[in-house]
Image (spheres, rainbow, N blue to C red):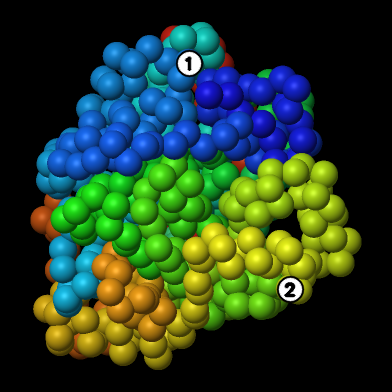
Amino acid sequence: MNYISTRGAWHDDPQPFRAILLEGLAPDGGLAVPQRYPRFTAAELAALRGASYPDLAVAVLSRYITDMPIVDLRRIVSSTYTAATFGSEEITPLSTLEPGVHLLHVSNGPTLAFKDIALQLLGSLFEHALRDEHRVLNILGATSGDTGSSAEYAMRGKRNIAVFMLSPHGRMSAFQQAQMYSLDDPNIHNLAVDGTFDDCQDIVKALSADTQFKCAHSLGAVNSINWARIAAQVVYYFKGYFAATTRDGQPVSFAVPSGNFGNVLAGHVAKAMGLPIAQLIVATNENDVLDEFFRGGRYRPRGAAETHATSSPSMDISKASNFERYMFDIVDRDPARLRELWRDLERGGGFDVAGTPLWERVGESGFASGRSTHADRLATIRDVHARCGALIDPHTADGIKVGRELRQPDVPLVCIETALPAKFSATIREAVGFEPPRPSAYADLESRPQRCTVVAADPSAVAAIVAKYALASVGAAPQRERA
Ligand SMILES: *Cc1c(COP(=O)(O)O)cnc(C)c1O
């Protein structure tokens, strides 16, 4: 399997997986996508029923990662998806909320959010690739909470990798801050920026745009457009499908709390690979750029001023970075047509496909969408607790609320649990009046020693720290900055 760009690069020179592993972005600004989606026949799907999570992962990933010996892939997958890391052999167990409505628990990894499923794998894939190519990677990122901790837990202790994670000093929840700052691995550098998340992101952009600095220090990113993250997420759609069905070929729908469109894109890919998915139900919060598109055909990313801070904060996005991969399929994988749409986006701030043949294709793609508000979130958390005896996080509540409204009555619905309630205790308390339980490993989290380096919201101050502690060459001993 080789990879092309959504905007046309690499079409005559498709790239192997290892060339797109570290960066999802193509040189023309497009995103890396596989040349085609590998399809499972009905018989191949039937043979996967009952497979363990690691076996399913190898079956799916080996179709995308074809330039790595299968024994290496198998070893990486088996050491990633373990009961020790994800809490059970099932890795992503399924429970039933009410007749026909299930919850797929994909958030039992180290940071209690679904991003661990992909990032844990990415950590091992990166380590493997860097060793083979005798390279080092210094990951530079900005986080408002969730992504940063997931990346740090995935990369801690990994050889030839260091992480420099910028976070807004004093602006995260106590839980999120403790989760990151209590890590004492020498290759993890927490930089607490005197400023906001936007300041952090601006600094990362400024340093990454400095090609000389970027090359000199082997800077990389672990952002949401990385294709390997999407591929890793495809696996739990398979797992959820088999867990929710009893016979082969039976359709299932998924409800997916969405922000950057990475999670639900993996569902779209699973469907393209032959999994019998009826509906992919996109749930947004008050930041409803995706809902607006799936309801009426207009895609209009918002600016920072129009992006609301909500009680499902990991979905507070103004544009959905992975949406371009979906639209590439809608335009029948014609990069010229895709470029036209994205030119409209850049020029006019949006595009509208209503009334065009593209809108028909969107309709045929099986997507449905709805939005959920703070009041809906609280009501859903309360209702699911009272009627189903389950405590859910605010993002998951958005998915269940919209999923229940839009589902087809005879098709089982799998709602994806994107985080555990322990991460968002204030909203849980507001909804049900008590603290959510915490996995025992996190009982004393906030009282553990923390370390971070406080730095001014100034690219040159951050650059100085990166230059000082970045891994310089293979085998160089990672150093630790002083707080
Ligand atoms: C990242 C995240 C989302 C959004 O997922 P996308 O792949 O960006 O659509 C939803 N819920 C939680 C808890 C998250 O961390």
Q: Residue at x 71, y 52 (%)?
A: 331
**Residue type for callout 2:** Ala
95 displayed left or right of 409: left
Q: Residue 65: x, y in percent?
A: 45, 24
Q: Which residue is mark 1?
A: 67
State the mark number for residue 354: 2
State the mark number for residue 218: none
Look at the picture and state if 463 lies above or below 276: above
Looking at the rendered image, the disc whose residue lies closer to the viewer, 2 or 1, is 2
Closest to the observer, 18 or 22: 18
Secondary structure at numbered mark 2 = loop
Look at the picture and state if 161 lies above or below 342: above
Q: Visible in this render: residue 448?
A: no
Q: Residue at x 37, y 48 (%)?
A: 275
Q: Visible in this render: residue 73?
A: yes
Q: Residue 216: x, y in percent?
A: 68, 21
244 displayed left or right of 378: left
422 displayed left or right of 121: left
**Residue type for callout 1:** Asp
Give the distance between the C-alpha atoms of the residues marked 2 and 1, in whole angstroms: 41 Å
Q: Residue at x 46, y 29 (%)?
A: 64
Q: Residue 371: x, y in percent?
A: 49, 80
Secondary structure at numbered mark 1 = loop
Q: Residue 432: x, y in percent?
A: 21, 86
